[in-house]
Amino acid sequence: MALIVQKYGGTSVGSPEKIAAVAERVKRFVDQGDQVVVVVSAMSGETNRLIALAQGITESPSPREMDVLLSTGEQVTIALLAMSLQKIGCDARSYTGSQVAIVTDSAHMKARISRIDEQKMRADLDAGKVVIVAGFQGVDEQGNITTLGRGGSDTTGVALAAALQADECQIYTDVDGVYTTDPRVVPSAKRLERITFEEMLEMASLGSKVLQIRSVEFAGKYNVPLRVLSSFQEGPGTLISLEEDSSMEQPIVAGIAFNRDEAKLTLLGVPDLPGVASRILGPISAANVEVDMIVQNVAQDQTTDFTFTVHRNEYKKTLNILQQVCDDLGAREVRGDDGIAKVSLVGVGMRSHAGVASKMFDALAAESINIQMISTSEIKISVVVSEKYLELAVRALHTAFGLDAKAE
Ligand code: ASP
Ligand code: MG
């Protein structure tokens, strides 16, 4: 007998038929003797529909009222799922976040969970009931409804699993696991049996959008084993946990992440003096622009070149700020490029393997792909290349690091 938290996303509960299918799946676990807590999202498209309704009234709705509105989506699905379970003879009770209580701070639309009262859930589980909890929502100390930010139901699932010390948190979605890279770019990408929290964080933050990043951080912090699986087909999915894969030869690279969301900016001919980096990046962070990669060259002729990347949405704004900085510092010139892409190898196995970077650069060179920037960490190597070579780069690296699935 195990205590399992299962989270079903919007597409998994997108229609009454799909909700009935979720009920059947939950019942199979119950029949097997497991205790099950189910967290659900709103039906697919519902949260967007609610946002559009609000925008039809005002461009700047109050965040408190937005939370009152958005939390209704999940309230619909918990009730429908409870009814579906009861209909097939499975005792179930639904709770909103506030009924549980999932207590959060008061930061509407991006609230953080501060504590969870697990008494009611435990009593229901011990009485043989399935507990169904609305994802994405909580309540602050004053009793106001809050929400956790888009995709927040994943975090609800993990937080409940942590509070109940569940054996596993299963995230049911429309893909059957985490892949070595995006299968739309590399058709031979394969599902990973397991991956560590650390690796998943790198994969997620670099654009593999299977799970809300915060939920993975949470799972890592409380060591909650997370499993990503499909609600539409049977299979083991991908287990995300603390342990590395010890069952076989540890692969050096777990996966390849990439994104097209960044733009590159360069300040040429910056005087080589203490404090210039801070004078360049200060105004940019003051404008709330997040900087990702940073490269500063060794100085020549008392000047240096300074290059960094920002989100592409912030490109124009940053370019304007940098022009001002250029004048203030007496630097030579500003250059920018928003046609770039970032490709990263991710894997805890890199820690113990030398030569990963040179193998990466060899593979890119063999395809005549020019590397514009490089950054490394213990478990990741990222390069910036021209956007038009992104897919070629990912495919070449996928093959070079032996990640291609064997043809059946
Ligand atoms: N319904 C919310 C959203 O669409 C929360 C979630 O699905 O996780 O963002
Ligand atoms: Mg979601």
Image (tube, rainbow, N blue to C red):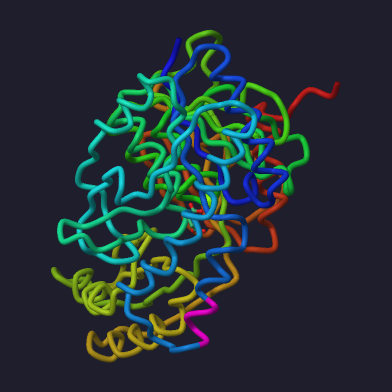
Q: Is residue 248 left or right of residue 197?
A: right
* Residue that sits furthest to the right in the current view: 408
**Residue 267 versus residue 262: which sits nearer the camera?**
262
Asked whether residue 353 appears in the rendered view, the answer is no
Residue 367 lies within the magenta run: no
Q: Could you tell me which quadrant the N terminus lies in?
A: top left
Q: Residue at x 34, y 49 (%)?
A: 97
In the image, residue 182 lies at what x, y percent? 66, 45
Q: Nearer the viewer, residue 127 or 354?
A: 127
Seen in the image, is 174 located left or right of residue 158? right
The image quarter containing residue 149 is bottom left
Say which residue appears at 38% left-offset and 36% top-offset.
158
Q: From the viewer's perspective, is residue 158 above or below residue 351?
A: below
x, y (%) of residue 168?
43, 23
162, above or below 126, in the image: below
Q: What secondary structure is the stretch in magenta mostly built from? A: helix
Residue 226, quarter of the rendered image: top left
Q: Is residue 95 visible?
A: yes
Is the C terminus in the top left, top right, bottom left or bottom right quadrant?
top right
Who's the residue at 31% across and 47% down the image?
99
With 345 as the anchor, is 45 left or right in this view? right
Left or right relative to 98: residue 53: right
Considering depth in this image, is 400 or 345 the residue closer to the camera? Answer: 345
Looking at the rendering, the stretch of residues picked out in magenta corresponds to 52-56
Q: Height in image: 230 above or below 252?
A: below
Q: Picture coordinates of residue 377 (x, y %)?
A: 37, 40
Query: How far across and down, in percent of the image, does residue 253 sit?
Result: 54, 29
Query: What is the total number of numbered labels drawn onto the structure image?
Result: 0
